Amino acid sequence: MKSHPQPPSPKQDTRDIDSILLIGFGGPTPGCCQRFNPCLAEEQTAPEAYCFVSEILAQRMRERKPILDSDRGKETFLSAQVPIRPDQARINEVVAHYVELGGFSPFNDLTFEQASALEAEVGLPVYVGMRNWNPFLTQTLSQMIDNGHKRVLGIILSPFQTFASWEEYQQNVTDALDQLATGESSQHANSPRAGSKANLRPTDVSARTTGSRFDRESTLDAMMEVAYLSPWWSEDGFAQAVVEEVRQSCLDWDRDRFQPAHLIFTAHGIPVSAASRSPYTRQFSQVATIIAEKLGKDFQIAYQSTPDNSLIPWTEPEITTVINFLNADVSSDVIVVPIGFICDHVEVLYDLDQEARTVAEAKGLQMVRVPTVGSSPTFIQMLSRRIRTFVSTL
């Protein structure tokens, strides 16, 4: 079993932060990502989606495929430079979801809307860096360095914590800073596109975030420290923002319709092995309970966006299974609330709005899919308060 590095808590500076970095998964937008030369998807009808999906699936295969490191005599794992391709049928299946929705994802645009809203609240510059698409973290951090930012507060755009949704993002930031520090150019998920100022001198940046090998403060001309906002899933502002979205979605319902309606909260499925060593499922269940109590309703939880025919077990129950077992005699309405996501990207727009809705309609149920919190003022104000609290403790 692969053991993931656990980044230590970043060292805090006694001075105020000077900028904020929103850290997200990313989604394909128009234009080549320029991670590979030659491009992997030049002949595809939806090249951006094809490149995005095939590389993400390849990353997952690298994480599970050990190789023998002959130099060190121990098991290691494939790097992003090793050519590896997942099952073509699986790539085509997922790409088809994007094609059906226009070939691109709204994830990045929606995240920039959140950044603009947050910037207006806190009065600090807010940047966006993605793990899997432009603007990659190396691009964004390079821009921040050029703009003179040295004390950064990172906000991970994941409500619940497992390695892939939390610590790995911190490690992505560290790797991006290390790449900038050495002037390396690498074809991996956080490589900058052509034209970005990535080839900085080693004295241009120090990556002190998560145990970087370039932690040489005394010899560097400039220093960037990245601290992270602690998990915010239990904040009342998050739960209240979800409640407001539910109420708005059912605005024209009277109590006699709203109370018996089936209520399902969803989060992205994760491997059972990951769930067993993280608080992800507990956090999901607890915040669902808090929201349901605010709404005065019973509820169920479900997981979505899990792969079919996986060789490893994933968290259950799956959303379509839950819908299939609903009793239409109790209510013909089902309210689906994706609290594991904070913007309406493809896994919400396809997996819920199309796949789950089709299952609901086949059972004679009317499904209402509640919007994610997005740039809800209540959600953004909660993040703003957390930022101010963070700064006041420095």
Image (spheres, grey):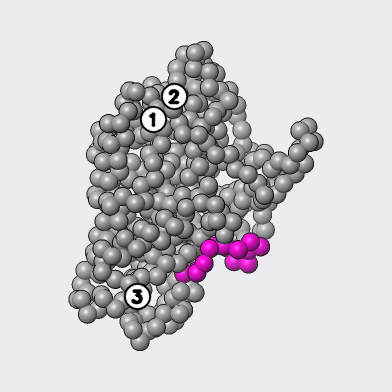
- Does residue 258 belong to the magenta stretch? no
Query: Tag 3: Cα neighbours inside 10 Å, few (<14), some, or many (≥20)?
Result: many
Can you name the residue that lies furthest to the bottom here?
A: 329
Most frequent secondary structure within the magenta stretch = loop
Marks 3 & 2, CB-CB < 8 Å contact: no
Element under label 3? strand
**Kind of residue sitting beneath label 2:** Met
Could you tell me residue 390's position as x and y percent?
Answer: 31, 35
> Residue visible at 63% across and 61% down?
312
Quadrant position of the C terminus in the picture: top left
Pick the residue in front: 202 or 8.
8
Magenta residues, start to end? 306-319
Pick the residue in front: 250 or 382.
382
Could you tell me residue 140's position as x and y percent?
Answer: 44, 33
Does residue 368 show up? Answer: yes
> Residue visible at 30% across and 31% down?
393
Task: Tell me, for residue 152, which label it has, or none.
Answer: 1
Pick the residue in front: 348 or 212.
212
Marks 1 & 2, CB-CB < 8 Å contact: yes
In this picture, is 383 found above or below 366?
A: above
In this picture, is 88 found above or below 259?
A: above
Occupied quadrant, residue 348: bottom left
Which is nearer the N-term, disc 1 or disc 3?
A: 1
Task: Tell me, for residue 224, which label it has, or none.
Answer: 2
Which is nearer the N-term, disc 3 or disc 2?
A: 2
Query: Tag 1: Cα neighbours inside 10 Å, few (<14), some, or many (≥20)?
Result: many
**Kind of residue sitting beneath label 3:** His
* Residue, disc 3: 262
Which is nearer the N-term, disc 1 or disc 2?
A: 1
Pick the residue in front: 259 or 224.
259
Distance between the alpha carbons at the discs numbered 1 and 2: 7 Å
